[in-house]
Image (spheres, rainbow, N blue to C red):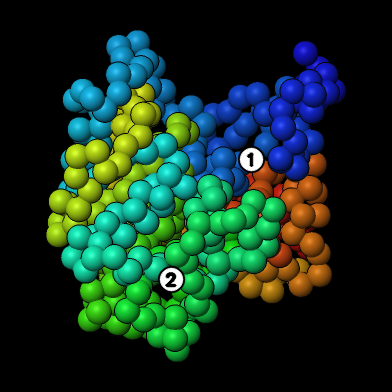
């Protein structure tokens, strides 16, 4: 089927909720993919931070294929080995007390919200159920996680939204003004990805954690995009020297398959008991088999140092480019602020020259596979430099 026919069929049969780039990707290996016409592209997107190990990592493909040949699904009414192994590794790597598995970042965030409210209800009773989130945040596209998202642009069309959320600017004065006796949790992203790759200020984060701890207000860290090595640490919280009560993961955890995870601290293990939560596909054996391969690669200090070094290389090269005003972010989660060009125009020009990049508000967003090679970085940078110069 030629590309024109593919586009026509897509528009006829799929809801038009995406503004797709004018290309159909057919295959990939590492950080290089190929379209249906045979043109190659360097990938600086990793499927919006999902393909941690790049396209078709041999160990990942082997594990997923073998698991598909043994057991694709059975439900959480039965024990299985892949999710058992994955939970054990996550607990050991992060020091958390227990894990709940779902299918996406939005679902993980919903689980975290329920856990925080249940904890407060069990301890304090009704009326302590409000959650403060930060302006410019993004937490998902369900009705509840849209309500949690601190951007007015997302609060349209689908009302009424779930109640129980307040928004505060990322400073202590605003947070203190938003908190009263009805607040059970504060929810944040250490780097606001969809908000423009904006890292939170370290002093603010530490002050916020101390403030919440004094009042038994839980801190929920949405690490859907920042987690699993993306920033050069396994969790972005490590950059700030803090421990959230609840952490959510998704995207890069599965390495290409849908998965979400809610990580709770030891003291919260008993909050969500029998029948309080569930997910039909949560802990799916195939997705967990892939995630186990991701963790075997990423849970390694040398690997994480290399991710950080690759990020610094990208930052250093782009910071001296003519149309670049600033580069924000950590590790391989970067936002490029432009002086003159529009991010969307840059993304389109890069595509034409053989490079895939993303946008986040007015910035060009870069989320390369964590395994991207120096040669692939060099080739991708050359294209981006040419466009930006």
Quadrant (top left, top right, bottom left, bottom right) of the N terminus: top right
Q: Residue lying furthest bottom in this view?
A: 173
Residue bearing mark 2 = 132
Say left or right for 20 vs 28.
Answer: right
Q: Is residue 206 above or below residue 249?
A: below
Residue 283 in view of the camera: yes
Asked whether the viewer can see residue 319, the reply is: no
- Locate residue 345: give its quadrant: bottom right
The crowding category of the residue bearing disc 1, from other C-alpha atoms within 10 Å (few below 14, some 14 to 19, many at least 20), is many
Disc 2 or 1, which lies upstream in sequence? 1
Residue 60 quadrant: top left
Which residue is at a point 71% across and 28% down the rendered structure image?
A: 14
> What SS does tag 2 mark?
strand
Occupied quadrant, residue 41 = top right
Residue at image coords 69%, 44%? 355
Q: Residue at x 56, y 56 (%)?
A: 161
The quarter in which the C terminus is drawn is bottom right
Query: Is 223 above or below relative to 42?
Result: below
Q: CA distance from mark 2 to mark 1?
A: 39 Å
- Residue for badge 1: 42
Disc nearest the viewer among 2 and 1: 2
Local packing at callout 2 (Cα closer than 10 Å; few below 14, some 14-19, many 20+) is many
């Amino acid at each position: 089927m030629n590309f024109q026919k593919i586009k026509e069929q897509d528009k006829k049969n799929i809801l038009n909720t995406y503004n797709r780039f004018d290309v159909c990707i057919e295959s990939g290996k590492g950080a290089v993919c190929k379209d249906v016409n045979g043109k190659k592209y360097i990938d600086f997107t990793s499927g919006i931070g999902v393909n941690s190990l790049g396209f078709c990592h041999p160990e990942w493909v082997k594990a997923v294929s073998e698991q598909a040949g043994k057991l694709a699904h059975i439900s959480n009414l039965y024990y299985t080995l892949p999710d058992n192994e994955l939970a054990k590794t996550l607990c050991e790597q992060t020091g958390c007390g227990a894990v709940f598995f779902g299918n996406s970042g939005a679902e993980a965030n919903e689980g975290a919200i329920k856990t925080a409210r249940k904890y407060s209800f069990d301890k304090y009773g009704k009326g302590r159920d409000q959650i403060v989130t930060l302006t410019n945040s993004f937490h998902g596209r369900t009705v509840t996680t849209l309500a949690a998202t601190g951007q007015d642009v997302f609060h349209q069309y689908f009302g009424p939204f779930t109640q129980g959320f307040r928004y505060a600017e990322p400073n202590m004065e605003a947070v203190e003004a938003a908190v009263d006796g009805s607040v059970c949790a504060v929810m944040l992203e250490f780097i606001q990805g969809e908000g423009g790759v904006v890292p939170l200020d370290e002093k603010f984060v530490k002050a916020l954690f101390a403030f919440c701890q004094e009042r038994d207000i839980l801190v929920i860290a949405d690490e859907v995009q920042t987690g699993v090595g993306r920033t050069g640490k396994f969790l972005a919280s490590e950059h700030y020297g803090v421990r959230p009560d609840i952490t959510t993961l998704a995207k890069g955890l599965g390495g290409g398959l849908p998965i979400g995870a809610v990580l709770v601290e030891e003291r919260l293990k008993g909050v969500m008991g029998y029948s309080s939560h569930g997910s039909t596909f949560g802990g799916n054996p195939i997705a967990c088999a892939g995630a186990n391969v991701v963790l075997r690669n990423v849970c390694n200090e040398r690997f994480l140092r290399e991710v950080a070094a690759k990020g610094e290389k990208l930052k250093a090269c782009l910071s001296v480019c003519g149309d670049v005003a600033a580069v924000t972010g950590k590790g391989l989660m970067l936002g490029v602020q432009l002086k003159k060009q529009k991010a969307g125009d840059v993304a389109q020009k890069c595509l034409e020259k053989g490079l895939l990049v993303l946008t986040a508000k007015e910035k060009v967003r870069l989320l390369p596979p964590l395994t991207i090679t120096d040669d692939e970085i060099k080739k991708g940078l050359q294209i981006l430099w040419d466009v930006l110069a």
